[in-house]
Amino acid sequence: MASIKLKFRPSACKGKEGTLFFQLIQGRTVRRMRSKFRIFNEEWDSAAGQIVLPQHPSPQADRLSLIRSNVELELRVLEDIVADLDLDGDAWDADEAVERFMMSRRIDGSVFHFMENQIQRKLKLGRLRSAETYQTTLNSFMGFRKGVDLTFSMIDSAMMQLYEAAMRSRGLSRNTTSFYMRIMRTNYRMAVEEGLTDDKRPFRHVYCGIDKTVKRSITFADIKRIKDLDLSQRPVMAFARDMFIFSFCTRGMSFVDMAYLRKADLKNGYLTYRRKKTGQLLTIEWTRQMQEVMDKCSTCATQYLLPIIVREDGSERRQYQNMMLKVNRNLKKVAAMAGLSVPLTLYYSRHSWATIARYNAVPLSVISEGLGHDSEATTQIYLDSIQSCEVDKANRKILRNL
């Protein structure tokens, strides 16, 4: 019976990445095949024969987790090849398995390998979040395909409709299936540009848009009630409340942008920053309400304005993610104390700012600029729920005496 193991060969040069490879033993024949991924010596556990994942969250942990997922995928491909050779019933040698494995990598237009390469490229560029979303999408599509690779030329409209239906049958929302479809479409378009397939427009019959979401705004009176809550004996809830108020005061600033605000961004009475999502430069007048929040915050020894990222040790992204979860969890308690029946999150501040601005007759173009949207169409998605609410209100008036 054939034996397959993942192995590691350290680099002879100090500080250089070593080589991951697969060892195949068939009978008395040993063959080695290099993985496409490389790691440092200290990132390999020789006793366990696997990649070491750091115990504490960090960019290194994210990178190694993605590499391990991809290496496990390569290993499964090799295991499937060996299983197929065994099922044939004929005698086979290790070289035949190696040839099939190497051929699987050379298939022109291989979807799995193409997306793996995109993930690798994003990792090298430090775009970890983007790499994670690509990996999640690849895992989803591989699950749909039962691990069977294919070429881009094999993708057609019928297949994408089946993929969408499979996701919906698992209870995924239209926005979630659309998220996966948009990433698949991006990779397909890149493959077309590289000449790996002709454009058959396989996504024309699946949903790639963004549905209107449930209204996520509260009234100005609600926000005032939240602001005025006495949380002096509940510091964790008070911090969550203060972050919500700061976001509202800064025109619904996203939490990731709040986390990465630098002290140097506040100059001459104005806060200037770039949105992480779009790269757009925004300038906000510094107000009394913003300063009130800052006065409550503990002084941070880092370059950052708010005490969300409190250490500059490579774990900044994980700190912001953990704090966001903590703040959102406590905002639900804050909402309950304020007598609100909504599952309050930081995102409510952004929707609420837009909604309240609209109620105060602020032009759509101004709201759009305030939110940092690329187009008024995006802003309109935020505000459509207002129009629906007004129609419902008018309908109640009409039906009142029926």
Image (tube, rainbow, N blue to C red):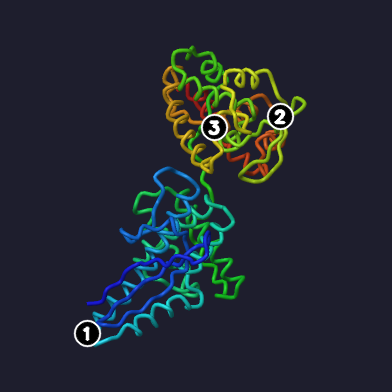
Q: Which mark is residue 115?
A: none
The answer for how far apart the CA atoms under marks 1 and 3 are is 61 Å
Q: Is residue 19 left or right of residue 262?
A: left
Residue 191 lies in quadrant: bottom right
Sequence-earlier tag: 2 or 3: 2
- Could you classify mark 3 by the number of other residues whose Cα lies within 10 Å: few (under 14), some (14-19), or many (20 or more)? some
Q: Which residue is mark 2?
A: 266
The answer for how far apart the CA atoms under marks 2 and 3 are is 18 Å
What residue sits 47% from the left and 73% below the top? 110
Q: Where 21 falls versus 350 (above or below)? A: below
Q: Please, what is the three-letter code of the amino acid marked with disc 3? A: Val
What residue sits 52% from the left and 15% below the top? 225
Q: Is residue 74 left or right of residue 311?
A: left
Q: Which residue is mark 1?
A: 89
Sequence-earlier tag: 2 or 1: 1
Front residue of 368/391: it is 368
Q: Which mark is residue 310?
A: 3
Is label 2 or label 3 in front?
A: 3
Front residue of 389/98: it is 98
Is label 2 or label 1 in front?
A: 2
Is label 1 or label 3 in front?
A: 3
Front residue of 46/299: it is 46
Q: Please, what is the three-letter code of the amino acid marked with disc 2? A: Leu
Q: Please, what is the three-letter code of the amino acid marked with disc 1? A: Gly
Q: Are marks 2 and 1 in contact (CB under 8 Å)?
A: no
* Furthest-right residue in this view: 268
